[in-house]
Image (cartoon, rainbow, N blue to C red):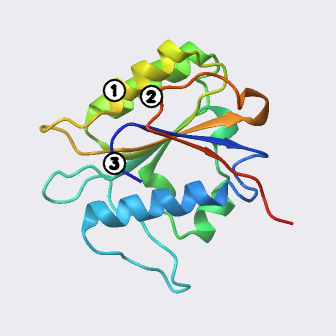
Amino acid sequence: LPLHGVHEWVLHGPIDHPPMHAFLHMVAAACDRQRGAATRCHDGSHVCKGSHDRDGAASCVAWIGQAVMPSAVAMHRRGMELHHHVQVPGARTPTERLWAFEEAARSGRCVAIVVDATGWNAAMVRRAQLASSWQPDRTPVLALAWRPQHEATARSACTTRWAVQPVH
């Protein structure tokens, strides 16, 4: 996925259940890309080390909204170091989640942002798009927006839109 703009996912279930593990995999891959080389733990999973590399490059991950909060167990299974992930479960309203998203995207400190976009209207999605768009003076960010299944038909200005369901 391109590291600019918002990629919207319409999924079933909480972040700890398939296919939500795709978020964890993409976030780990974004951390690896930012570092230039993957660091792996004993089971071969990805590791995000350091909130910032020595050269000042961004490497933290923001998880915004309770619905997209992975458990510590799920993150540990992927080899992610918890102290390099910022969780914002208190952003309860669509407006609060958008504000937190915009701040994270413009900070230049995040390599990836995963946000609960429940209740976002087309104008809010466009604001998120603008905040996460490529800027020459800022680290590109992987922006993933989750929407519940009942919002699959909502208008969106996202870069890509994915309808993902588990295979049984």
Residue reaching furthest bottom? 42
The label number, if any, that marks residue 131 in the structure image? 1
Using the image, determine if residue 117 lies above or below residue 69.
above
Mark 2 vs mark 1, foreground winner is 1
Q: Amino acid at mark 3?
A: Leu
Q: Answer with the quarter of the image where residue 88 lies.
A: top right
Q: Amino acid at mark 1?
A: Ala
* Closest to the observer, 164 or 13: 164
Kindly state the secondary structure of the residue where label 3 is placed.
Answer: loop
In the image, what residue occupies the spot 59% across and 66% down?
76
Say few, some or many: other residues with alpha carbon within 10 Å of mark 1 (under 14 / 14 to 19 / 20 or more): many
Q: Answer with the quarter of the image where residue 73 lies.
A: bottom right
In the image, what residue occupies the spot 79% across and 46% down?
13
Q: Amino acid at mark 2?
A: Phe
Q: Are marks 2 and 3 in contact (CB under 8 Å)?
A: no
In the image, what residue occupies the spot 13% across and 39% down?
136
In the image, what residue occupies the spot 12% across and 37% down?
137
Q: Are marks 2 and 1 in contact (CB under 8 Å)?
A: yes
Q: Are marks 1 and 3 in contact (CB under 8 Å)?
A: no
Residue 16 placement (x, y as % from top left): 72, 55
Rounded to the nearest whole Å, what is the CA distance between mark 1 and mark 3?
12 Å
Q: Quadrant of the C terminus?
A: bottom right
Rounded to the nearest whole Å, what is the CA distance between mark 2 and mark 1?
8 Å
Sequence-first disc among 2 and 3: 3
Using the image, determine if residue 48 lies above or below residue 64.
below
The label number, if any, that marks residue 101 in the structure image? 2
Say few, some or many: other residues with alpha carbon within 10 Å of mark 3 (under 14 / 14 to 19 / 20 or more): some
Q: Quadrant of the N terminus?
A: bottom left
Residue 44 placement (x, y as % from top left): 51, 83
- Residue topped by disc 3: 3
